[in-house]
Amino acid sequence: MPFYALVGVLATAVHYLVLVTLVELAGVQPGMAAATGALAGALVAYAGNRRFTFASTAAHTKALPRFLAVAALGVVASAAIVFAGTEWLGLHYLLPQVVATALVFVCGYVLNRRWTFA
């Protein structure tokens, strides 16, 4: 799990960089910016996890669609949490994003370990 965490930190940094840039500089709504950031982070995560975390030899035709399905679930969950936190609870967008990141991190590891790169 240490490599998963390191890859996750890098992917999360990309995610947050895209998120903050889109919200603060481009005026994009936080939920959409969170989804876009999560997609960018997912691409970084796939490459790092395939190579370092799971050292997978599974064909890209098998692993990539599975990884993207797990990532898509994470994107939807992340965007929903940020939307609910900002629109329904009136929170600053980064607070629900931190909650979403933690939940997606744990669920993503389990799903990727047991299904994507198994």
Image: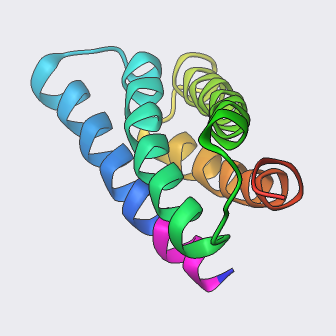
Residue at horizontal 39 percent and vertical 25 percent from the top: 36
Residue at horizontal 66 percent and vertical 40 percent from the top: 67
Image quadrant in which the C terminus is located: bottom right
Horizontal side of residue 98 vs 103, given as left or right? left
| Residue range of the region highlighted in magenta in the rendering | 2-7
**Residue 92 can be seen in this image:** no
23 up-or-down from 45: above or below: above
Compare residues 113 and 51 and report the one nearer the observer: 51
Horizontal side of residue 14 vs 26, given as left or right? right
Horizontal side of residue 3 vs 27, given as left or right? right
Q: How many marks?
A: 0
Residue 12, given in percent of the width and then of the height, sits at 43, 55
Horizontal side of residue 82 vs 81, given as left or right? left
* Residue, far right: 114
* Residue, far bottom: 2
* Residue, far left: 25
- Give the main secondary structure of the magenta stretch: helix
**Residue 72 can be seen in this image:** yes
Residue 21, given in percent of the width and then of the height, sits at 18, 35
Compare residues 65 and 85 and report the one nearer the observer: 65
Compare residues 21 and 36 and report the one nearer the observer: 36
52 up-or-down from 30: above or below: below
Residue 92 on the magenta span: no
Image quadrant in which the N terminus is located: bottom right
Residue 91, given in percent of the width and then of the height, sits at 50, 34
Q: How is the image coloured?
A: rainbow
Residue 48, given in percent of the width and then of the height, sits at 47, 63
Compare residues 91 and 103 and report the one nearer the observer: 103
Residue at horizontal 69 percent and vertical 43 percent from the top: 63
Which of the 4 quarters of the picture holds residue 39? top left
